[in-house]
Amino acid sequence: MSDRITPLVMPKWGLEMRQGTVAGWLVDEGTRLEVGTPVLDVETDKISNAVEAPDPGLLRRKVAQQGQTLPVKALLGVLAEPGVSDAEIDAFIASYVVPAAGSDEAEAAEAYAFAEVDGLRVRYARRGLERGVPVLFLHGFGGDLGNWLFNIAALAEVAPVIALDLPGHGQSDARLPGASLAELAGFVARFLDRLNVERVHAVGHSMGGAIAAQLARDHAPRVASLAVFGSAGLGEEVNVDYTRGFVDAASRRELEPVVELLFADRSLVNRALVDGLLKYKRLDGVTELLGTLHGALFEGGRQAAMPLRDLAGKPLLVVWGAQDRVIPAGHVQHAPAHATVHVFDDAGHMVMMEKAGEVNTLLRSHIGA
Amino acid sequence: MARKISMKQAINEALDQEMVRDPTVVLMGEDIVGGAGGDGERDAWGGVLGVTKGLYAKHGDRLLDTPLSESAYVGAAIGAATCGMRPVAELMFVDFMGVCFDQIFNQAAKFKYMFGGRAQTPVVIRTMVGAGFRAAAQHSQMLTPLFTHIPGLKVVCPSTPYDTKGLLIQSIRDNDPVIFCEHKNLYGFEGEVPEASYAIPFGEANIVREGKHVSIVAYGLMVHRALDAAAALAREGVEAEVIDLRTLSPLDIDTVLESVAKTGRLVCVDEASPRCSIAADVSAQVAQRAFAALEGPIEMVTPPHVPVPFSPALEDLYIPSAAQVAAAVKRTMGGSKHG
């Protein structure tokens, strides 16, 4: 082994990922990589995404072949400077051993936890550092904490991280504490009480952005800063084809075109992603509950409230995908004057997934880590 | 993350949750209360393979032990359904269904049509199907085509614990008679199942593996044989799409047609006897409606047209294997641009 050789390995995107399939290489051997350069595409049973270079370096060898399915931490490629000989690289590849999957204890520490808030069971994940102001991730309408799949680990390196399934979403109980932003934000505040967390950097996507803003208004001391992605709560318009379509779709055939509206690159919507959403939507009570939430927040394609507008006194990061087909990127014009605004050209509503590397860099700098 | 449970446990959980949710749900069957009361034992055996174990202790008199007369209690279940109950009758082996054909085919299936759409018959008949259990010709049949043939019946045959729970809950909530076919060799098969209740709509096939070269259509145990074949074929560069029909009536032929439009090739796998089978039905519909899309002959993989043999060696040969499925794929791919 040589410290002059950097292995590029199969990432672990979320607790449930055990293996990934190499969909294709994006660069050739001999390419000089910067941190965050997309190197190859990997498909998992949840989603497809690009593996980015962890360190700067020269891609000397592609080890994994297109179409190969490999376990987490398997060797995908080798980065090394020209001074390292081919023989050394061959020896490195030959001696590389895939680290065993985490022990049961490590897995248990990583597993999801459940808390009861107002008699409602909430699933959440707590990761990262012990000390510091935690980053709180709030997903959007119909989503779950898995929407932050590519962000949680990156932020956990620099801060404590909390992500929850909002009531009626993911694996939390299929009940609502109320359908207004104030009731949902109040619930989040009581969830933080339950975890003995005083203050958070609130990070929200879509409806979760509006909840974060409402939290900052109603419970100002609890929110150190805000970061919102493709957020509700800034402008009036919301694509009812998505929101109503998501509520009403009962089959794969109906749901797939709706889910495609979330991404700039429709090919990211694979069978497993749609199947996962169908499994959630089939749970007793979910369709009715989403209908109620939709009626309260997005009826007729108009947002009921705009708590992000004129929100003062908190550091605010506003991020959008220019190709957002759910909430138009034009809403950034309503962002408060002090906000830092960033629009990615080739991303859609799920900008934090489609631009994970850049988004993580923005988030880290936003929270001052 | 959802926990893993067996198909048998998934059936038990679906019945339990529906009994809690809806007081009109009752269970009927042979020996489902058997064993209770002996030596201070509160619970029952839960039927011949223990599928309903634990439910008697919890729901008591809503489990009705029946005489060994399928014609009597299946008829009673159908009658109770027309009067507002939602009975789930357990008919041990599908092979015994013959003695209650009149109740099922001529009564339950017909009421809605003969009473101007006003009569509902929300009955579920759960029954074990399939070979491989060393139980010989009278306890091993896959009679799904018989029920699929009759208008007015819905026919379900799941392949995984997740589908089993969701489809059984849908069966109980459905207002029509449902024949729910459980493959006994899948009872121990485990998979992730949510703890909460959920219903999977009828008539929605599941694409369990995506591929572009050939469509393999199957249901029940044969889904797993098809998946094994697809995995073997993938190593040779053939990408097979595997479609689990899940419900045979209603049938999601649209998903099959869309898949064949993409792949141009169809292999139907069925554990039922080959004549007038589900495989024959799907093949005929595709030939009628997607002939222009076909790039090769439709292949069927079924048992031979004989009763299930008692000899274990012959029984193993009788049930369609992954190797037979793979061979059928190669036949239909023969001489093609992919082959």
Image (cartoon, rainbow, N blue to C red):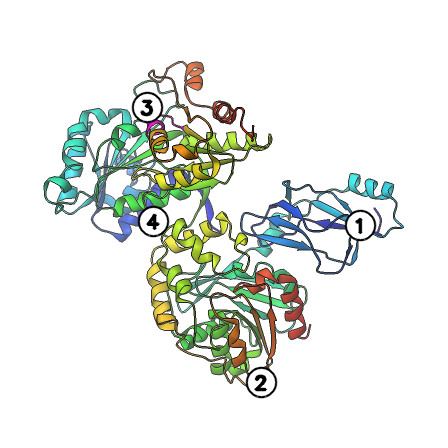
Determine the chain carrying the residue at label 3: B
Give the residue type that dot 3 points to. Answer: Gln
Contact, mark 4 vs mark 3 (Cβ under 8 Å) = no
- How far, Cα to Cα, is label 1 from label 4? 53 Å
- The image quadrant of residue A364 is bottom right
Question: Residue A30, labelled with which disc?
Answer: 1
Callout 1 environment at 10 Å: few (<14), some (14 to 19), or many (20+)? some
Residue at the outermost right position:
A83
Do badges 3 and 1 share one subunit?
no
For label 2, count other residues whose C-alpha is less than 10 Å away and answer few (under 14), some (14-19) or many (20+).
few
Q: Give the residue type at disc 4.
A: Ala
Q: Classify mark 4: helix, strand or loop.
A: loop
* Residue segment shown in magenta: B269-281
Q: Is residue A174 magenta?
A: no
Q: How far apart are the two marked residues, 4 and 3, measured between alpha carbons?
A: 28 Å
Q: Which residue is mark 3?
A: B141
Distance between the Cα atoms at labels 3 and 1? 62 Å
Amino acid under disc 1: Gly
Question: In the rendered structure, which amino acid carries the disc numbered 2?
Answer: Ala
Return the x and y of residue A116 as percentages of the image width and height: 44, 65
| Residue under pointer 2 | A337
Left or right of A195 in this view: B283: left
- Is A72 placed left or right of B84 in the picture? right
* Pick the front one: B155 or B33: B155
| Callout 3: SS | loop
Same chain check for tags 1 and 2: yes
Q: Which residue is mark 4?
A: B199
The verdict on residue B275 being magenta is yes
Q: Is residue B301 above or below residue B109?
A: above
